[in-house]
Image: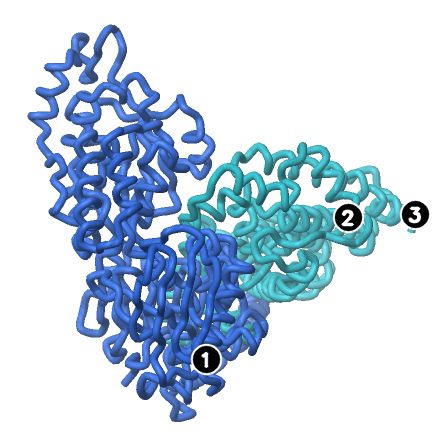
């Protein structure tokens, strides 16, 4: 409990530092939301009008002042309004979060379902034809960028086979299928190799030979010992993926019109919509700290050696 | 045994994935309910373009109001960008400051309320009260309404008042009905029923439409920001028509299954010279650049023919545009000679000319958000190198900061709608006069300033057209601006869609004639 509280308290300086850094870096990017809007619409306005618009948003003040005004409002529970849409930042964020969480959960589940069995097969049949095929698939999956996989799936599953719609119209299994598959293909390719390597490493250990000598069935050894020993590796991989997925996958969300926080963040960066960017940065910091914390706690549950403080680890 | 277990485990788990994904696709709703429904994909309908809703009195939202057939203006532009009556029947310029506009007598809003002069007065008064740009453009002092006659008094002579009333912000809406979730009540063939910003807009047929029967029952406009997704959605049949397709995707639709509707718009891709730069202030260098850019090659090869070669500031759809202005033609040999005569020679044999020990190297600034501009930059870099001019490209989203400075840049390539409301002075007022906000290169031409004064006091359309031609010739002769091409705006639809027609002003898309068979 003490450990958990300590980790959560560490969030405070992290949030302070990261929001300040992002605030400063966005100012270094050059233009601001007023200029971006002018460029997008072809609007011609005088310098005086530009300055008046900046004053209205408080962008005329020094960066430090702007940051502390934002921080003060935040501490009063006000995350501000978007410079682009004029909507409340917190409401906008909360509105888009379910889509991102759903996509994260579905793609992680699909990744587990694909990569664990294939990783097991690849390890059990090491250097056999099926192992080569799985390794080749893994190699291809790792080599292809996400947007390319998305376009290939759209072409075959959407245009040729007409199994799924190209564009997401609300949250449904049909709409969820292709973005989930796209993310799961890339992650599974990575996971399969990791799981294969971990299982092979585990299968080489003495206790496997011991179990075999004692006449323990291979399936029992595989599921009760080997897979359990591999769980720490799998959990680590999952934690990293969940962290990045919960931050949204801007390209996938844009391509499939999946209205999540990743697309929102990239749009906000392009438009220099500072209040939205700050909210996103805070969200990212919180999820990484929380996911890491949960992962660390899960290690203690899954592996008694960690819980009992095995120095050999 | 261990092989069997592993195989079974893999098979069961993998199969479960595909069972989850393999739901059957529902039939499209348009086929089921017997209604004529069209789904339209658009890359530009979003809050980034200040089109977060369809209330014309807010930012640039009027573009969506007018494009999607929700609202209509008093007058409109025809295919030659000439003014024609729409909700109004006629107008009269009583004196420099007074305009009388007579409305048609059969106009009703979609809620069946009569659209008379009082309703128009209320709408325009609300517009100038809340919309800073409209208030500045229109300079309205007072409005009086009498039956179907509207009298507008301006605070200063406004020869282009009627043109400005055609701007999308001029859509006449029932202000008494208010704004509901960003939706307004207009007079157009369609009524907005549901709007989710950056996602979709649902429209239904206006049962009370004053100008004929509306053929479609429902339209859904989808905001699709990714160009590849837009193309695949049209290929798969998820959408029936598209606006904003990337040039690279055009060949996919050049067959009998699809229909293109295209027109030249006044969105120009042009170069602006920095007179503060010692190199560019040399007239020979500017002239060589003007002769050294292969505009036809750029349009025909890099834009696959989806553009128009530019001469002056306006395309030939305008009475004062196209070939009426004589720009320098592509002539690399003559350009080389001009540079030689001006003392720019390649003395060290590195392929780049020098003069007084200074290399003929220019900093070319542009931005990536318009797909044509990086292509233009690369094309110019290659063709100018043939002349012995080194072009250093800086294509950046932060272009505004760079060109705001006097130094550090030589040529700025940008895109601009030069004649959005059919008024040629718009471009000169914003870019080419001494007081222009976007006269970034410090260009000054005394004759041009005089012509601008003459234009501002001229109301006759023919005379204004003649002055506009002279003004363009001035800036083209000075090589202060080089107009490379104009955007050929295209909409692509499935071949069963009829009545979708691109217009030069880019305002009107959905009409009562829009249909799907």
Give residue A73's mark: 2
x, y percent for residue B219: 41, 79
- For chain A, the rendered hue is cyan
Q: Colour scheme in the image?
A: by chain
Q: Are marks 2 and 1 on the same chain?
A: no
The blue one among the chains is B
Question: Residue at label 3?
Answer: A2
Image quarter for residue B336? top left
Image quarter for residue B420? bottom left
Element carrying mark 2: helix
Question: Residue at label 1?
Answer: B191
- Mark 3 chain: A
* Mark 2 neighbour density, 10 Å: few (under 14) some (14–19) many (20 or more): few
**Residue located 62% across and 47% down the image:** A277
x, y percent for residue A178: 48, 67
* Mark 3 neighbour density, 10 Å: few (under 14) some (14–19) many (20 or more): few
**Residue located 31% across and 73% down the image:** B86
């Amino acid at each position: 409990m003490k450990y958990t509280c300590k980790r959560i308290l560490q969030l405070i300086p992290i949030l302070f530092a990261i929001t300040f850094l992002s605030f400063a870096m966005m100012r270094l990017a050059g233009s601001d939301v007023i200029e971006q809007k002018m460029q997008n619409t072809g609007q011609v306005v005088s310098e005086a009008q530009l300055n008046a618009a900046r004053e209205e948003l408080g962008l005329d003040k020094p960066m430090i002042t702007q940051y502390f005004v934002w921080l003060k409002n935040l501490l009063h529970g006000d995350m501000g309004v978007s410079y682009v849409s004029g909507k409340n930042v917190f409401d906008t964020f909360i509105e888009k979060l379910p889509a991102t969480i759903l996509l994260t959960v579905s793609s992680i589940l699909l990744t587990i379902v694909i990569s664990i069995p294939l990783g097991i097969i690849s390890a059990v049949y090491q250097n056999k034809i099926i192992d080569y095929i799985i390794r080749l698939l893994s190699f291809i999956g790792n080599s292809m960028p996400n947007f390319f996989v998305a376009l290939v799936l759209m072409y075959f599953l959407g245009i040729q086979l007409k199994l799924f719609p190209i564009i997401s119209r609300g949250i449904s299994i049909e709409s969820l299928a292709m973005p989930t598959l796209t993310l799961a293909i890339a992650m599974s390719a990575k996971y399969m190799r990791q799981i294969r390597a971990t299982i092979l490493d585990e299968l080489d250990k003495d206790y496997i030979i011991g179990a075999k000598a004692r006449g323990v069935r291979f399936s029992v050894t595989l599921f009760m010992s080997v897979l359990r020993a591999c769980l720490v590796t799998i959990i680590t991989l999952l934690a990293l993926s969940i962290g990045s997925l919960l931050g949204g996958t801007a390209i996938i969300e844009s391509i499939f019109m999946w209205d999540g926080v990743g697309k929102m963040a990239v749009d906000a960066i392009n438009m220099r919509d500072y209040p939205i960017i700050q909210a996103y940065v805070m969200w990212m910091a919180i999820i990484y700290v929380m996911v890491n914390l949960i992962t660390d706690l899960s290690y203690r549950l899954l592996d008694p050696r960690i819980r009992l403080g095995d120095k050999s680890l | 045994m261990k092989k069997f277990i592993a195989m079974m485990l893999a098979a069961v788990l993998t199969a479960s994935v595909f069972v989850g994904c393999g739901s059957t696709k529902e039939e499209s709703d348009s086929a089921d309910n017997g209604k004529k429904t069209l789904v339209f994909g658009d890359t530009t309908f979003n809050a980034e373009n200040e089109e977060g809703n369809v209330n014309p009195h807010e930012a640039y939202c009027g573009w969506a109001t007018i494009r999607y057939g929700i609202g209509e203006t008093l007058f409109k532009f025809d295919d030659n960008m000439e003014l024609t009556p729409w909700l109004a029947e006629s107008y009269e310029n009583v004196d420099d400051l007074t305009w009388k506009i007579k409305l048609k007598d059969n106009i009703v809003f979609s809620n069946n309320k009569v659209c008379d002069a009082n309703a128009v007065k209320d709408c325009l008064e609300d517009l100038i009260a809340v919309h800073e740009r409209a208030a500045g453009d229109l300079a309205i002092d007072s409005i009086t309404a009498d039956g179907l006659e509207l009298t507008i008094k301006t605070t200063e002579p406004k020869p282009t008042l009627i043109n400005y009333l055609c701007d999308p912000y001029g859509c006449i809406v029932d202000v008494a009905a208010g704004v509901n979730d960003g939706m307004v009540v207009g007079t157009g063939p369609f009524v907005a029923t549901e709007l989710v910003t950056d996602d979709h807009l649902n429209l239904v047929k206006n049962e009370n439409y004053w100008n004929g029967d509306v053929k479609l029952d429902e339209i859904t406009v989808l905001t699709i920001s990714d160009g590849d997704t837009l193309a695949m959605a049209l290929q798969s049949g998820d959408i029936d028509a598209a606006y904003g397709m990337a040039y690279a995707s055009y060949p996919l639709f050049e067959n009998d299954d699809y229909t293109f509707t295209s027109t030249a718009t006044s969105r120009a891709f042009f170069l602006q010279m920095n007179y503060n730069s010692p190199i560019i202030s040399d007239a020979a260098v500017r002239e060589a650049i003007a002769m050294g850019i292969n505009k036809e090659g750029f349009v025909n090869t890099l834009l696959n023919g989806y553009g128009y070669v530019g001469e002056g500031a306006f395309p030939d759809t305008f009475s004062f545009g196209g070939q009426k202005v004589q720009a320098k033609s592509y002539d690399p040999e003559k350009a080389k000679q001009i540079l030689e005569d001006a003392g720019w020679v390649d003395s060290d044999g590195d392929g780049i000319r020098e003069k007084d020990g200074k290399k003929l190297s220019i900093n070319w600034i542009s931005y990536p958000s318009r797909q044509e501009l990086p292509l233009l930059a690369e094309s110019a870099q290659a063709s100018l190198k043939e002349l012995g001019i080194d072009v250093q490209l800086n294509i950046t989203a932060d272009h505004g900061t760079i060109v705001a400075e006097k130094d550090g840049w030589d040529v700025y390539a940008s895109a601009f709608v030069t004649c959005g409301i059919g008024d040629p002075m718009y471009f000169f007022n914003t870019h080419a006069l001494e007081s222009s906000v976007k006269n970034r290169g410090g260009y000054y031409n005394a004759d041009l300033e005089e012509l601008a004064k003459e234009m501002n006091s001229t109301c006759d359309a023919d005379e204004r057209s003649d002055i506009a031609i002279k003004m363009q010739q001035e800036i083209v002769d000075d090589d202060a601006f080089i107009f490379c091409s104009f955007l050929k705006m295209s909409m692509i639809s499935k071949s069963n869609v009829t009545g979708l027609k691109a217009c030069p002003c880019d305002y009107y898309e959905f009409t009562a004639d829009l249909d799907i068979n």
